[in-house]
């Protein structure tokens, strides 16, 4: 499988989390995903995105992620998400990226998830790196 771009919008936007999950080193840049909204979830610190017309999500695009690290990301995200190819925008233009779309609408808190309120130390203490899931 060829390398693919990955759009992140929650815990994986933060290098401290991303680097615990993947083994490779990847260039990244700010990106925007239109047609989706980011929500807080009712019982966890990480967010979800769901399709919503007219909405948009700011995040980080990691470039050319290899298949082994994509598999690690799949394991980290688990069955609560579906990986999907989506169009994203960056300062240098448009790209297609993989992202993780939430599946269980009943757990949406119906309030925004705010990156500035995300506690990296608390998250890292609660969730193992994907390498432990292999």
Image (cartoon, rainbow, N blue to C red):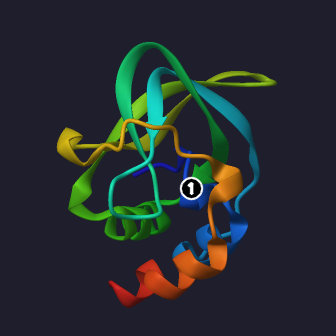
Q: Nearer the viewer, residue 100 or 54?
A: 54
Residue in view at x 65 percent, y 43 percent: 61
| Residue 128 visible within the image | no
Residue in view at x 31 percent, y 43 percent: 108
On the picture, is 122 further left or further right than 52?
Answer: right
On the picture, is 6 further left or further right than 85?
Answer: right
Q: Which residue is mark 1?
A: 65
Say what secondary structure mark 1 lies in. strand
* Number of numbered labels in the structure image: 1
Residue in view at x 61 percent, y 49 percent: 64
| Residue 112 visible within the image | yes
Q: Position of residue 58 (x, y in %)?
A: 64, 34
Residue in view at x 39 percent, y 52 percent: 1
On the picture, is 103 further left or further right than 124?
Answer: left
Q: Quadrant of the C terminus?
A: bottom left
Q: Nearer the viewer, residue 65 or 54?
A: 54
Q: Position of residue 54 (x, y in %)?
A: 48, 9
Q: Nearer the viewer, residue 70 or 11?
A: 11
On the picture, is 95 further left or further right than 106?
Answer: right
Q: Position of residue 12 (x, y in %)?
A: 57, 60
Picture layout, residue 16 above or below residue 33: below
Q: Position of residue 92 (x, y in %)?
A: 80, 24
Q: Residues within 10 Å of mark 1 (few under 14, many from 20)?
A: some
Which residue extends farthest top? 54
Which residue extends farthest right? 91
Q: Nearer the viewer, residue 31 or 27?
A: 31
């Amino acid at each position: 499988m060829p390398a693919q771009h990955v759009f992140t919008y929650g815990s994986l936007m933060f290098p401290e989390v991303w680097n615990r999950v993947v083994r490779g080193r990847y260039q990244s840049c700010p990106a925007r995903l239109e047609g989706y909204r980011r929500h807080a979830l009712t019982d966890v610190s990480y967010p979800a995105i769901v399709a919503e017309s007219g909405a948009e999500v700011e995040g980080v695009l990691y470039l050319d992620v290899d298949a082994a690290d994509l598999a690690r990301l799949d394991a980290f995200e688990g069955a609560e998400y579906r990986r999907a190819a989506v169009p994203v925008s960056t300062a240098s233009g448009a790209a297609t990226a993989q992202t993780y779309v939430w599946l269980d609408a009943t757990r949406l808190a119906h309030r925004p998830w705010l990156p500035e309120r995300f506690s990296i130390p608390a998250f890292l203490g609660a969730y193992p790196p994907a390498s432990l899931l292999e």
